[in-house]
Amino acid sequence: MENFLKLAKQLGRLKVVEKPLDVELEIPHVAYVEIKKEKPNVLLFTNPVDGKTGFRYGIPVVMNAFAGFDITEKIFGRHPDQIAYEIDKLLHIRPPSSLREKISVLGKLFYLKNVFPKRLSKEGKCQEIKITGKDINLFHLPILKTWEKDGGRFITAGQVYTKSLDGKLQNLGLYRLQVVSENQIIMHWQVHKDASHFFDQYYREGKKMPVSIAIGGDPLYTWCGQAPLPYGVFEILLYGFIKGKNPVLVKSTTNDIYVPEDADIVIEGEVDPEDFRPEGPFGDHTGYYTPVENFPVMTVKAVTMKKKAYYYATVVGKPPLEDKYMGWATERIFLPLLKTTAPDLIDYHMPENGVFHNLILAKIKPMYKGHAKQIMHAFWGVGQMSFVKHAVFVGEDAPQLTDYHKITEHILNRLTDKSFLISEGIVDQLDHSSYQPLVGGKLGIDATGNPVEKTVNVLPDEVLLEKVREIDGDVVSLKQYMTNTANPVTIISVKKTKPVKQIFDRLKTLKEHLRIVFFVDEKDNDLDNPYMLVWRITNNIDALKDVWIEEIWGADATRKWEIDGYRRQWPDDVFCTKEVIDKLRKEGILNVDDTFLKKFQIISL
């Protein structure tokens, strides 16, 4: 971490905040605003404090390590596409037919020697200081509370190292960790995650599960923790492949789990299979608070750290955030591996305002009728891709997937009633839109065909709004997008007093003027902000219940409750606390205007 901070400083991208700031709300709010800038900075807070007690932490806080595409590339040592190219070469090694080819193949295989960890027999840098027994107090670490309605303080960038009951498999995962006492942490490993699968093994045997949590060190460790590798593959192997050198690990002091020897802080403990407690709420990467659920508790047995340690944390919430850049690297590096499942895949892209799992764009080489739908099913059956809710497929003639205006035009000009596939499958445990936990709708869109004829007679917004409001009084406003395409999009905001499907059915009388209609709540939605509308719509739809392909096409992205047949508790958006933002602006720590705050819905509209 120290080397990384020196690099960020050399690049002119390290912003040092020396003013004492509270670990509750103030520090995370500064990081949350900073990462949304066009060219964000890595942040170093040298004087974190507990605003309630006045306690001054002796450990600086580092945030926004992945502060842009350029910084992320520096962390990896080269462009992620180059790493993907190297993976692709390994995947396509063929038996050599000449001495020259044999030497080439041996060179590629020899490089793999760097993948495997080197395990030290002595203590590592992360064990220069050891805290055990009654001296353990997690509240002496500058652990943050990000959001006003969070259930407490959370470790947000903890590298969670675990192993299977038989010791044969190891795992590195990235999970949020709620601190509930001086020596106890609730482990939010979701049901689909590898660490949760390991825990099931200990649970069935009634045995306590050893866990070591590393914080800091090389930021690449943290990225490895979220890499979508198959079950049983130790994520730290990726570090060695990317860096071209063996990761150096050291044995924990109270268990036999190995962690990076250059981590800044390591928290060691055991998870009791009989101790489950309510965890949350927590404002998560979806931009919503996730509800309170029971998760297992870890009791800390030791805390070790460097003499000069840094506490690394990330902030999650509404996009764009640090995961925009982490996800970009993941997307690029794992393209060759995804192609092994879908060989005719050319490229794919996960827009950050689609919160990754909520929206994926894919370019394919369609070879036969129904090919796109075949690949949809392949995507929904592969690892973490199985969490994808909305997948849009285009042909090889489509524009760049990151040219959002052109690709949207291209898609809308190729849609017919037969373009849509609605299915059911697993969804992320954090997804709130599904009408039952863990299972929900999937929407696949095939836009690989030829352009279609435009049949919609587009009216000016104000004229169309008048006609729509005559039909239903719940409608507040509307805005049309892409009116030059064959399938224009109309966004309608409502003050909902009844199921939106009833409004949709009445609007069919305007089918000559409407094609695609999305419904959103009037509250906290700006119809002139398409970036955040994509975030809202992809978050709030369960395709099984909320998408209608009829005389016109519609989707309900409003908040749901009993009138919709929705029996779960719909979560609140995450918003920064206005008083804290005002204070930070007044003190000159935040230099953003109201337009910026509104653009990314940082505070409530």
Image (tube, rainbow, N blue to C red):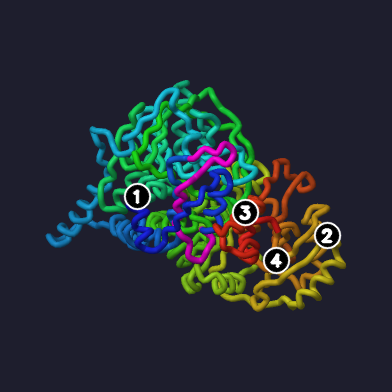
Amino acid tagged 1: Glu
The span picked out in magenta is 35-56
The circle on residue 583 is 3
> Sequence-wise, which precedes: disc 1 or disc 4?
1
Which mark is on residue 527? 4
SS under mark 1: helix
Asked whether 491 or 347 is in front, the reply is 491
The mark nearer the N terminus, 3 or 2, is 2
- Dot 3 or dot 4: first in sequence order is 4
Rendered image: mark on residue 2: 1
The type of residue carrying mark 4 is: Leu
Q: Are marks 1 and 4 in contact (CB under 8 Å)?
A: no
Furthest residue to the left? Answer: 99
* Marks 4 and 2, how far apart at CA: 16 Å
Distance from the alpha carbon under mark 3 to that under mark 1:
30 Å
Mark 3 touching mark 2, by CB under 8 A? no
* Magenta residues, dominant SS class: loop
Q: Earlier in the sequence, mark 3 or mark 1?
A: 1
Q: Which residue is mark 2?
A: 474
Which is more foreground, mark 4 or mark 2?
A: 4
Say which amino acid is labelled 3. Lys
Mark 4 residue crowding within 10 angstroms, few (<14) / some (14–19) / many (20+): some
- Element at badge 4? loop
